[in-house]
Image (cartoon, rainbow, N blue to C red):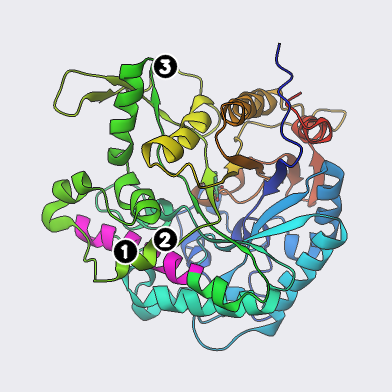
Amino acid sequence: MTSYSFPANFQWGAATASYQIEGASQEDGRKPSVWDTFSATEGKVLNGDTGAIACDHYHRYRDDVKLMAELGIKHYRFSLAWPRIVPEGRGSVNAEGLGFYSRLVDELLAHGITPHATLYHWDTPQALEDAYGSWQSREIAQDFADYVSVVVKHLGDRVTHWFTLNEISCFTHLSYSVGGQPAHAPGKRVSRIRDIWQTSHHALLAHGLGCQAIRAASPVPCSVSWVDNFAVPIPLTESEVDIKAAQKAFPNLWTNGGIIVPALTGAYSPALLETLGEDAPNIKPGDLETIAQPLDALGFNIYSGQYVRAADNAQGYELLSIPKSYPRLHMPWLHVTPDALYWGIRHISDTLHRSDLPILITENGCAVQDEVTVSGEVLDCDRIFFMREYLRAAHRAIAEGYPLRGYFAWSFMDNFEWAYGYDRRFGLTYIDYATQRRIPKASFHWYAECIRQNRVV
Ligand code: IFM
């Protein structure tokens, strides 16, 4: 019987993102982000919700950090709002915006919690959307790097763990894509496939220039990483043929061939470029070298994967569609596939041959239909079931020698779930939005016990 114990230095953490929790959207010099504009537009976000108040973390961060300490996390991943710090996206710096993050970092450190800062989690300054269509323009990569330099010069004496961008495919492909689907996120719909790939190419450039900017600006040695939610093919059976099939599928799934593959190997997947043909993005000389910066770790956000099996066809594999009755939690895409966590890590090591790259699970968790009982508890055994299975898969990866170093639960607290507003709850902490009361859920206490015992309980 295994006890599911983790290595002594395993990093237990939790994560959030600026627009999803901060609120105070018009305070202390912050200017609008594309998400302020999008959510204020009728019909874009469920129930007309916006991030204007969210969890009011901007004013309540001290209490929130205290609660993090009660949870027992030693690592906290948060993001900085670009429009709080450089409100117009480029040019003048807002000292009050920097001041907030400086106070937050001090509070974390005072509680023995290591800050892990994500420099961009989707809240692009609206001014850059107005100026040049944000990710549609190559200009954004340099503007991002300039903003990064400001942040790292200011906080780099106390923050030594940096992530550049969160989930490129979501704020590019899902935001700009062609077609009649409902808008999932801000971004001017573009009419050509090539224009969509151009947005993710610009994001990759921003990541590369951002890495260089961090290293140049940091006053002390630091860890430079990036966060991706690459698609994970899971072999239907762990037979040699199905494993090979999953490996063949890896660069062809979703945006993998044009995002994670170039970032970690320095080249777009040849099969993707062939398929895209005229629709391939414009890649200038030197771009790939900029993009494939050395990284100290890879942040891997994992929720669901896709089953694959070997097939006697030209590709050598078949993607299986998810059956109607497959277990799923409270998002349309949230299929319970703990093996995706294990296989995602294995694909980085074995399929992309990057076993040298330490991996952090920078997000994992689920939305469930939480209810507060009459006695004031939230008994989310469905979330515990989900997270326990994924942590067991994490344990398996480590036991087999894969370089998994940490796990950040998504999310520390319920928050603004983008186009789903406050309707979907991903937190370990319940937020009563009417009163801003925080209620630690059963999963909070369960996760605290995992951390305390350094194993899956
Ligand atoms: O809430 C999001 C987060 O901002 C990015 N990763 C997925 C989460 C759940 O949808």
Residue with the mark numbered 3:
238
Q: Residue at x 36, y 23 (%)?
A: 243
Q: Residues within 10 Å of mark 1 (few under 14, many from 20)?
A: many
Position of residue 383 measured from the top left corner of the image (x, y, whole percent)? 66, 28
Position of residue 113 measured from the top left corner of the image (x, y, whole percent)? 79, 54
Q: Amino acid at mark 2?
A: Pro
Magenta residues, start to end: 190-211
Disc assigned to residue 288: 1
Residue with the mark numbered 2:
186
Is residue 199 visible in the rendered image? The answer is yes
Relative to 103, 367 lies left or right: left
Q: Residue furthest bottom?
A: 92
Near-viewer residue (233 or 9): 9
CB atoms of marks 2 and 3 within 8 Å: no
Alpha carbons under labels 1 and 3: distance apart? 34 Å
Relative to 207, 370 lies left or right: right
Q: Amino acid at mark 3?
A: Glu
